Image (tube, rainbow, N blue to C red):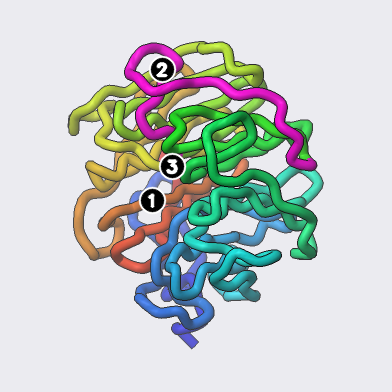
């Protein structure tokens, strides 16, 4: 049964202050329950895990229970209704609706909580409402959708039906500018954006006003090298996937470093091109998609 499990180890006991992951699964394969290129990860409204598999041969989203049992998968490769071409991220709205960044098709796909297709918005381009390689997706408390429009170096905001509301950002390294905005996380009135090539996290209001930033390029604690994904727990602590350093960093909302874990490798607790990160609202369990090890690893969050 290991081929159909997210977690190779079924022992779910853990210590919240410990680093070793409870479970992991390897690949690569397109079989259900295994991964080819795992990227974005998020919790649905029932507490199950949604994991994006970005491979062009079998673009899909897989759903797992938190104990690692694969439940089902959705999608296929293409540009038709409900299909994906190299999807990157997934986000879940307060009402349970699901939004997926269909990166290769330069659009966002919208499904209801039962995975019934609900619509699509966006197309290739650089005008408001268009995309050039959309990556991270996040939803605020009222259901508005925020998209990291990667090659256009901006964040775009839409209402739940996909109506364009506003955009902010341009190419650069100054405050509010981006060089490859990769992912977005929202906590209350604050929007966090991982600014990949500037190796930092920027903070904005819900309307795009610049609030602050933390991180700089490097490998020392608190520094970053090409951060990809970001997540916030129910207490407001911020978790950054520091891909270039093969680690996770945990910060206060103000950007003060609290914890660091991970290193390059293929053993338990090690990463090879980690990409996505999700954390439960209590901040007890942290889930990381470990791309080149073809697995998801689960950790107890350092307090």
Magenta span of residues: 161-182
Residue 200, image x and y in percent?
34, 26
For label 2, the residue is: 213
Residue 218, image x and y in percent?
19, 29
Q: Is residue 199 left or right of residue 97?
A: left
Image: 59 above or below 127: below
Q: Secondary structure at mark 2?
A: strand
Quick check: marks 1 and 2 in contact, CB under 8 Å?
A: no
Q: Nearer the viewer, residue 294 or 221?
A: 294
Q: Earlier in the sequence, mark 1 or mark 2?
A: 2
Q: Main secondary structure of the magenta part?
A: loop
Residue 67 seen? no
Numbered label attached to residue 28: none
Q: Nearer the viewer, residue 207 or 220?
A: 207
Quick check: marks 1 and 3 in contact, CB under 8 Å?
A: yes
Query: Which residue is at 43% across, 33% downward?
Result: 181
Q: Is residue 163 magenta?
A: yes
Residue 81, image x and y in percent?
70, 65
Distance from disc 1 to disc 3, alpha carbons, whole Å, reads 6 Å
For label 1, the residue is: 275
Q: Is residue 239 left or right of residue 187?
A: left
């Amino acid at each position: 049964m290991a081929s159909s499990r997210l977690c190779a180890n079924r022992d779910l006991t853990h210590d919240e202050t410990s680093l070793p992951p409870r479970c992991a699964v390897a690949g690569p394969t397109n079989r259900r329950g295994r991964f080819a290129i795992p990227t974005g990860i998020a919790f649905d409204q029932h507490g199950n895990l949604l994991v994006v598999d970005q491979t062009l041969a079998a673009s899909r989203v897989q759903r797992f229970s938190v104990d690692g049992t694969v439940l089902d998968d959705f999608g296929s490769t293409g540009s038709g209704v409900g299909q994906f071409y190299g999807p990157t991220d997934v986000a879940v709205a307060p009402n349970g609706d699901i939004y997926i960044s269909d990166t290769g098709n330069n659009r966002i796909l919208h499904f209801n909580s039962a995975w019934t297709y609900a619509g699509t918005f966006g197309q290739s381009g650089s005008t408001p409402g268009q995309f050039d390689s959309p990556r991270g997706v996040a939803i605020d408390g009222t259901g508005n959708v925020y998209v990291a429009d990667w090659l256009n170096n901006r964040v775009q905001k839409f209402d739940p039906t996909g109506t364009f509301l506003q955009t902010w950002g341009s190419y650069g390294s100054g405050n509010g500018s981006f060089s490859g905005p990769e992912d977005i996380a929202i906590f209350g009135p604050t929007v966090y954006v991982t600014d990949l090539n500037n190796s930092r996290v920027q903070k904005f209001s819900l309307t795009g006003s610049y609030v602050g930033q933390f991180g700089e390029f490097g490998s020392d604690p608190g520094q970053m090298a090409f951060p990809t994904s970001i997540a916030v727990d129910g207490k407001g602590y911020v978790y950054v996937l520091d891909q270039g350093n093969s680690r996770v960093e945990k910060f206060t909302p103000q950007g003060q470093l609290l914890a660091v874990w991970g290193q390059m490798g293929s053993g338990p607790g090690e990463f090879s091109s980690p990409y996505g990160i999700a954390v439960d609202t209590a901040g007890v369990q942290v889930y990381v998609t470990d791309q080149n090890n073809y697995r998801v690893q689960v950790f107890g969050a350092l307090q």
